[in-house]
Amino acid sequence: MQSPRRLGLAAIIAACVLWGGSFYFGKIVLRELSAVQLVLWRFVLATLFLAPLLVLLVKRRRDGMRPGLHLFPQRKDALLFATNALLMVPLQFVIQFEGLARTTATSAALIVGSFPLIMALGAVLFAGERLRLLGWVAIACSTVGLVVMMGLPGDGRTLLGDGLVLLSLVIAVAMVLVTQRLLRRYHPLSVTVWSLGFGTAILFVYSLAMNGWPTIPQEAVTWGALLGLGVGCTTITFSLWNWGLQFIPASEAGIYINIEPLIGAILGVVLLHDQMTGGLVIGGALILVAALLISWPQRRRVPLPV
């Protein structure tokens, strides 16, 4: 394993660990704010912390950058950036936290365990990769797990909430595939900052039109959780994730997302006292087993003939 690949893998894993805390922080913020307001504040804070890093990078005159990478969006990529921004902020995260508002942190975290399978399918359908037999078995296992979980809602959980979280994962796959296209021509920090900034601006306009000016949180614990979301679970994680995607294929990076549901489920049970029903345990276990199957050591995938 070459050094850049090792560092890229470490960045992907670290991002997934930090992302696991987003469900815990989200539940705290949702006690005072709506899902739209939560996402808006989260990404306003994230953009404020990330933008100075981009300015610093510009001042250093692109030291250490790979030749051919840009820091500012080019006109020909405006639609690609707009698509990435729309998928990332207003769609993926608003839908995910609307789902979290209607289910438990533990349930939402375990459903996220199906992301590696959805990512693998996306790679097969849109990136020309092959999926081995074990991968199809994993997809079947994960599907059964989702049916068991979502078909047996318990305290604090609804079918709608779990379904919205699942839908946000499909949108996340589309976002990752678009992000990878941008990373061929742009510095990872640039992709993160401009995508978050544009996405936040879109969400602000929507929120202003639908609900007026953003609600200012009154509780200190809400601000603490928002900082956890904005800095820990967004500023740091997206920087690590996009940087790691330079060296790790999207389908392989998606495998490590199964770290996120483990962290999220543990925090939900230990800190939020979420109830662990039989359906949640069995379904969640099937999803995590499926994630392990899809990540089982294998030969390098061969692209399908064009």
Image (spheres, rainbow, N blue to C red):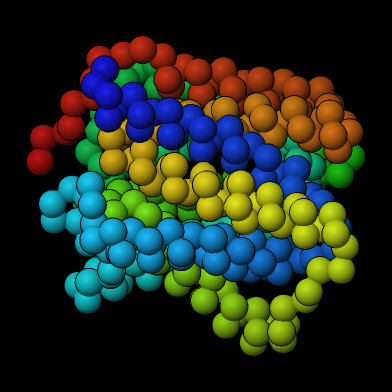
Q: Position of residue 235 (x, y in %)?
A: 53, 52
Q: Position of residue 242 (x, y in %)?
A: 38, 46
Give 69 or 141, whichever is nearer the viewer: 69
Give 86 or 248, whichever is nearer the viewer: 248
The residue lying at 22 percent from left, 72 percent from top is 74
* Number of marks drawn: 0
In which image quadrant can residue 157 be found? top right
In which image quadrant can residue 16 be found? top right
Q: Is 185 displayed left or right of 297 in the figure?
A: left
Question: Where is 69 relative to 135, above or below?
Answer: below
Looking at the rendering, in which quadrant would you find the C terminus? Answer: top left
In which image quadrant can residue 150 be found? top right
Q: Position of residue 187 (x, y in %)?
A: 29, 54
Q: Is 48 displayed left or right of 123 in the figure?
A: right
The residue lying at 88 percent from left, 62 percent from top is 219
Q: Is 7 displayed left or right of 4 in the figure?
A: right
Question: Where is 232 relative to 206, above or below?
Answer: above
Q: Is 6 displayed left or right of 117 in the figure?
A: left
Residue farthest toward the front in the current orientation of the protein: 60
Residue farthest toward the left in the current orientation of the protein: 306
- Residue 16 visible somewhere in the drawing: yes
The residue lying at 66 percent from left, 52 percent from top is 229
